[in-house]
Image (cartoon, helix red, strand yellow):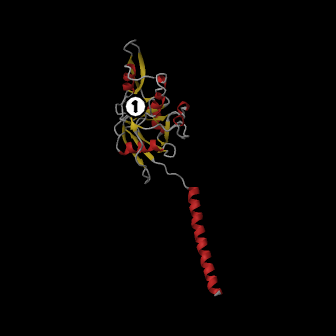
Amino acid sequence: MKKKGLILSIILLIFVLILAGFLAYGYYQKATYKLQRPIVSMEIKDYGTIKIELYPDMAPNTVKNFIKLINEGYYNGLTFHRVEETLIQGGDTAGDGTGQTELSINGEFKENGYDNTMKFERGTLGLARQDYTYYSSLSADLVEKGYNSGYAQFFITAEDVEAFNDYYTAFGKVIEGMEIVDKIKTLETGTEKDEQTGETSQTTKPVNPPVISNVTVDTFGVEYGEPETHESFDMNSWFTNYYSGGLSY
């Protein structure tokens, strides 16, 4: 009986040790786990490829939407229509920043109630949106309408832009190809003439806008699902209604 009890004790001890080993390994995996974020490859015709790491932990819905658009081929053939010293911007179907979309997504940044701690440092990927702050005296909710007006247009900062922090959605960082961003930001831009004054001024649209020939994303097997979207706000219709007396604020 003593021998049988000893054997059972040894078996129990082995079981406990194995269980402890599994638990310890699990804790080790959690402690050493590194989030594998999605990687975007953006091929720019005649320039090369910009690689961008997305941050679903900071802006999950924006990343979902960007991945969805990429997989649909939305950006293929579009251009970088805006170049400045501080950033380059693309993703507009009209090619000049005026393109409209039927859908929009909420801006995931602090001023809009989201805990996104990313800062707009050099090489940050941001979601472009409308800014209706100037018209907030007409209606306070226009500020929020602007916050939630982004969808497809994006920009990449060529230097730190502190003014964007907490007011625009940062959702990725360039990990390869910043030299391409630096080339694009210095492209020659066109001019426009003011019909009333006759004065000519410089625009931010390149004379030869760089073409985004192909965009792909590697999610490393992770399915990010469908983004939450809402119907886009039509500012032109809002103004029409407001000045015709259809709205009262």
- Most extreme residue toward the top is 197
Residue in the image at 54% along x and 32% along y: 161
Q: Is residue 84 visible?
A: no
Indicate whether 81 appears above or below 60: above
Q: Which of 238 and 178 is in front in this view?
A: 238
Quadrant of res 243: top left
Quadrant assignment for the C terminus: top left
How many numbered badges does the structure rendering display?
Answer: 1
Residue 214, horizontal then vertical, whole percent:
36, 42
Quadrant of res 204: top left
Q: Mark 1 points at which residue?
A: 233
Q: Nearer the viewer, residue 191 or 187?
A: 191
Residue in the image at 45% along x and 31% along y: 145
Q: Is residue 13 left or right of residue 208?
A: right
Q: Which of 52 and 134 is in front in this view?
A: 134
Residue 213, horizontal then vertical, whole percent:
35, 40
Q: Is residue 123 left or right of residue 20?
A: left
- Most extreme residue toward the bottom is 1
Indicate whether 17 appears above or below 76: below
Residue 48, horizontal then vertical, whole percent:
41, 40
Which secondary structure, mark 1?
loop
Residue 77, horizontal then vertical, whole percent:
34, 37
Q: How crowded is mark 1: few (under 14 residues within 10 Å), some or many (20 or more)?
A: some
Quadrant assignment for the N terminus: bottom right
Q: Can residue 129 be seen in this view?
A: yes
Q: What residue type is labelled 1?
A: Phe
Q: In this view, does 248 lie to the left or right of 166?
A: left
